[in-house]
Image (cartoon, grey):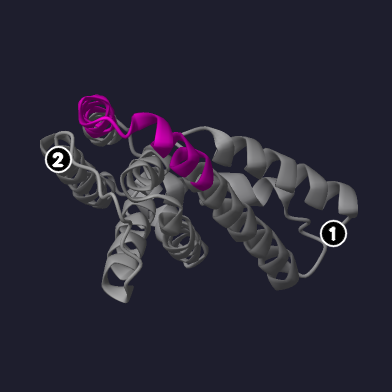
Amino acid sequence: MSFETWLAFAAASTVLLVIPGPTILLVVSYALGQGWRTALPMAIGVALGDFTAMTFSLLGLGALLAASATLFTLLKWAGAAYLVWLGIKLWRAGGAMDAKPRADAASSLKMLSHAWLVTALNPKGITFFVAFLPQFIDPKADLFPQVGIFAATFLVLAFANAFTYALIASRARNAVRNPRTMGIVNKIGGSLLIGAGIATVGLRAGQS
């Protein structure tokens, strides 16, 4: 694999990751609510979620999802329902915002698991890896070293992207300490998460 190929993969991955999706909406919502301490567990959760989706893809689940409308639909509804549930919770939070972000293991584990589930349960992510990775694979070279490098690159970028979004949102948190303002932010964030869940249901099997 040439350096140019790796650089093209890294650049394409960065562009795709920077575009906000359900995962980033969740990261931003947590960061606004609990501050910068959410950055690390959320970023780890996102990376683990992408690793899960990538692993399923490499094991052939992505191809199965693209071929099986029933399986794709089941996974799609599971992911959509989880997003809607999170959105409703955020909407009902009103103007609540923790003045002192919790840094205990339980809350960190909860944030990590939420980020992992939202990322891993997105069927679009699984089919995306199936369609995306092969474009950069050299069939004349050993497969596993290439896949390993590409996977590690993508996971590092996914971690950095989520971490950066969380830090930026946590800085903006100081500007939304007013309960009324935070209530509006929670409602907007909740609506976006619910909308993302509904949009997920609209995905057709085989789309990347």
Q: 42 left or right of 89?
A: right
Quote the CA–CA distance across marks 1 and 2.
Answer: 49 Å
Residue occupying the point 64% across, 44% down: 13
Residue occupying the point 28% across, 28% down: 185
Task: Examine the rendered structure and indicate whether residue 132 appears above or below residue 139.
Answer: above
Q: Amino acid at mark 1?
A: Met
The residue under label 1 is 1
Q: Earlier in the sequence, mark 1 or mark 2?
A: 1
The residue under label 2 is 93
Range of magenta residues = 167-191
Q: Contact (CB < 8 A) between labels 1 and 2?
A: no
Q: Amino acid at mark 2?
A: Ala
Count all numbered tags in the image, as a single digit.
2
Q: Which mark is residue 21?
A: none
Magenta stretch contains residue 28: no
Q: Position of residue 133 (x, y in %)?
A: 63, 51
- Quarter of the image with the N terminus is bottom right
Q: Position of residue 200 (x, y in %)?
A: 29, 35
